[in-house]
Amino acid sequence: MKFQFLAVPRVERKETQKSVRILRAARRLFIREGFAKFSARGVAKEARLSLGAVQHFYPTKHNLLAATLGYVVNQYDGGYQKLLRKLPGCGEARFLGILDYLLADIWNQNSRKFFFGFWALSSHNKFAAALLQEMYAYHVDRMSGFIAEANPMLAAERCHEISIQLVALLEGLLLFSPKPGKNLVSRAQMDRITRSTALAMIGLKPERP
């Protein structure tokens, strides 16, 4: 089942090639122009579709914004599933695989632009803030599950607490993902430090350098 936000009334529409085309265009537009120029008309132009086609699937700007963030969240879930099918059943390997996936994404400039744009919007837009709150609650729950697999000895409440800290750590690393200056560590060093820190947080022995 795909993730959907509770902050906006659900619009019952089947996913089609056209609806996915619209959401891909909406993501591109948001990354390039930000929320100021984010509109159904702008998305329609970006997707090379009629305004009516966009409004058929996403009648309001709130519907469109929520669907765009939902599309991004579900892209991560799709990436997780594809990755997990390739990994062994070992909980620690699965946890580290997901961690590496998220670390790699931190260095993706489109991801940086998208989330920095959404964070900026949420600081003065209550609807966007509600969407982000739901997204992070979902993200924390997903990460908590991977932590529980990696260390079954941890209580569920402790997995949740560690997950909050780890998600905050990963999000904070976005600030350091541009080309490092002379006083910052390299990408390889940052990835290694984060993996070791994450393993220590969940009570597992850090990897040897």
Image: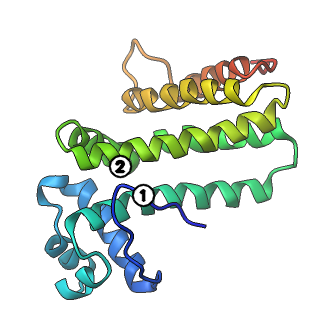
Indicate whether 60 appears above or below 198. below
Q: Residue at x 42, y 79 (%)?
A: 12
| C-alpha span from label 2 to label 1 | 7 Å
Q: Nearer the viewer, residue 98 or 4?
A: 4
Q: Is residue 139 left or right of residue 52?
A: right
Q: Nearer the viewer, residue 157 or 118?
A: 157
Could you say where residue 132 lies in the image, as x and y percent from the top left?
37, 44
The residue under label 2 is which amino acid type? Leu
Indicate whether 56 appears above or below 178. below
Q: Nearer the viewer, residue 135 or 41?
A: 135
Could you say where residue 14 lies in the image, as x and y percent from the top left?
47, 83
Q: Quadrant of residue 124?
A: top left
Could you tell me which secondary element the residue under label 1 belongs to?
loop
* Quarter in which the N terminus is drawn: bottom right
Q: Residue at x 33, y 76 (%)?
A: 22
Q: Name the residue tied to disc 2.
A: 131
Q: Residue at x 61, y 30 (%)?
A: 163
Could you tell me which secondary element the residue under label 2 belongs to?
helix
Pointer 2 or 1: first along the chain: 1
Mark 1 and mark 2 in contact (Cβ < 8 Å)? yes
Q: Which mark is residue 5?
A: 1
